[in-house]
Image (cartoon, rainbow, N blue to C red):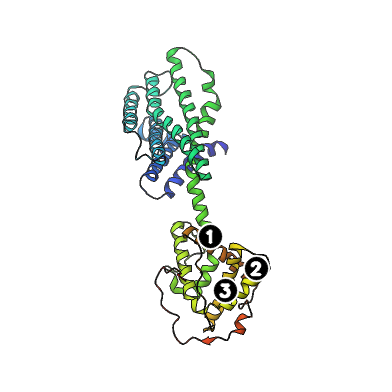
């Protein structure tokens, strides 16, 4: 089981990350090339793949050439990605030509050698060309990665870059070990450490995993962040949707727990639709409820955003009740502004949704304040008013 996980795990992870990333330009495209190179390289070195390729093509070493080709692509794409992360429009043009020339020389020596055993003719030259094709790009990855990690303000990005740099260093060490192993028969010396399990298995596996984890970490944490935001906005959004189904661009088809794709866009749409729903409830918002709950929340020790969210949740609960009974208070209140930008507004609505959900779980009555009883409602004689799609509060 351990061997199977070591052989298949990194390849499966690389393909999973590659297939879940959408297309893009600039740095994002380079990162997709990194994952493509890693996925092809890791798949080609699985023993099962080697056997299949050998049986189909009749060449026992063709899978290793694919493995090495993927690594050359990964090294070149990695330095292109790091260049863009550091503000350059692209990596040095000569490095692309260097990698292409190194790969061409590799193919020449691969065609000339009968096999890739260390003692075979032209294997040393093949390994030297393989190392030379990657070394400038790998050096650039380490230098620019450390530079950007020192300047990055985001902790996740710093951790990601350092993991990539550490994996690249391990990869350079493995590359040096393979080169020495190929040179030793020709030069007549024995380098015992190159044949140990640590050098042959642990070193490359660690390098692959560190690069994969570092490259995938921002994407994975970003997905998890938006997944949690989407679910946390759910209680408030569903209550508003039941009151005003027109706010939803697409009716919900599956539970939130099963929504796994396009989460950034879905969170954005959910925030806009919640704002549409709150705007539709504006005629039913009772300022007396807001004032009473605000005083009660202040007396209980709530301050800042926690108090504002609790007040808004109670106001929305009362407004939903008034909407359901087709009546409005004598006075109506304005929808609060919320956050200063999209991220801040999303955080505010998440807090409101949490307070709204907790109030429902606590079996709070539909009319959370006696303020409604002190302000007689009048029946609704017409539609609540018109609003535009994607409307935001200006009150």
Numbered disc 3: secondary structure: helix
Verify CB contact (< 8 Å) between mark 1 and mark 3: no
Looking at the image, is 352 positioned above or below residue 1?
A: below
Name the mark on residue 347: 1
Name the mark on residue 298: 2
Give the image location of residue 250, x and y in percent: 42, 67
* Residue 387 falls in image quadrant: bottom left
In this rendering, does residue 53 appear at all?
yes
Q: Residue at x 34, y 38 (%)?
A: 90
Q: Nearer the viewer, mark 2 or mark 1?
A: 2
Q: Quadrant of the N terminus?
A: top right
Give the image location of residue 104, x and y in percent: 31, 28
Give the image location of residue 128, x and y in percent: 39, 22
Of labels 2 and 3, earlier in sequence is 2
Give the image location of residue 5, x and y in percent: 54, 39
Looking at the image, is 248 positioned above or below residue 94?
A: below
Looking at the image, is 194 positioned above or below residue 206?
A: above
Separation of marks 2 and 3 at Cα, in angstroms = 15 Å
């Amino acid at each position: 089981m351990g061997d199977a996980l070591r052989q298949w795990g990194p390849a499966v992870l690389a393909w999973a990350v590659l297939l879940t990333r959408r297309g893009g330009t600039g740095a994002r495209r380079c990162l997709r090339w990194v994952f493509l190179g890693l996925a092809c390289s890791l798949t080609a070195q699985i023993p099962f793949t080697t056997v299949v390729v050998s049986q189909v093509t009749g060449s026992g070493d063709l899978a290793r050439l694919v493995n090495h080709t993927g690594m050359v692509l990964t090294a070149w794409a990695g330095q292109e990605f790091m260049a863009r992360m550091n503000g350059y429009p692209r990596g040095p043009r000569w490095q692309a030509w260097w990698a292409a020339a190194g790969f061409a020389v590799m193919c020449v020596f691969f065609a000339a050698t009968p096999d890739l055993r260390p003692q075979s003719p032209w294997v040393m030259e093949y390994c030297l060309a393989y190392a030379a094709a990657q070394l400038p790009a790998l050096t650039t990855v380490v230098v620019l990665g450390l530079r950007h990690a020192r300047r990055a303000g985001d902790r996740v990005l710093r951790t990601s870059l350092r993991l990539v740099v550490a994996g690249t260093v391990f990869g350079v060490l493995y590359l040096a070990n393979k080169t020495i192993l190929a040179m030793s028969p020709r030069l007549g010396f024995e380098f015992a450490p190159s044949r140990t399990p640590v050098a042959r298995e642990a070193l490359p596996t660690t390098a692959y995993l560190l690069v994969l984890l570092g490259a995938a970490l921002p994407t994975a944490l970003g997905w998890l962040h938006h997944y949690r935001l989407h679910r946390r906005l759910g209680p408030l959004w569903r209550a508003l949707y039941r009151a005003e189904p027109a706010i939803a661009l697409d009716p919900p088809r599956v539970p939130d727990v099963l929504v796994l794709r396009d989460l950034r866009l879905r969170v954005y749409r959910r925030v806009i639709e919640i704002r549409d729903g709150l705007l539709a409830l504006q005629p039913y918002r009772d300022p007396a409820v807001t004032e009473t709950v605000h005083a009660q929340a202040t007396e209980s020790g709530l301050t800042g955003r926690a108090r504002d969210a609790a007040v808004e949740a109670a106001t929305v609960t009362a407004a939903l009740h008034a909407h359901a009974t087709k009546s409005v208070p004598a006075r109506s209140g304005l929808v609060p502004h919320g956050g200063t930008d999209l991220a801040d507004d999303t955080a505010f609505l998440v807090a409101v949704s949490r307070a709204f959900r907790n109030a429902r779980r606590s079996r709070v009555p539909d009319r959370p304040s006696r303020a409604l009883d002190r302000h007689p409602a009048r029946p609704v004689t017409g539609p609540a008013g018109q609003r535009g799609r994607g409307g935001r509060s200006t009150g």
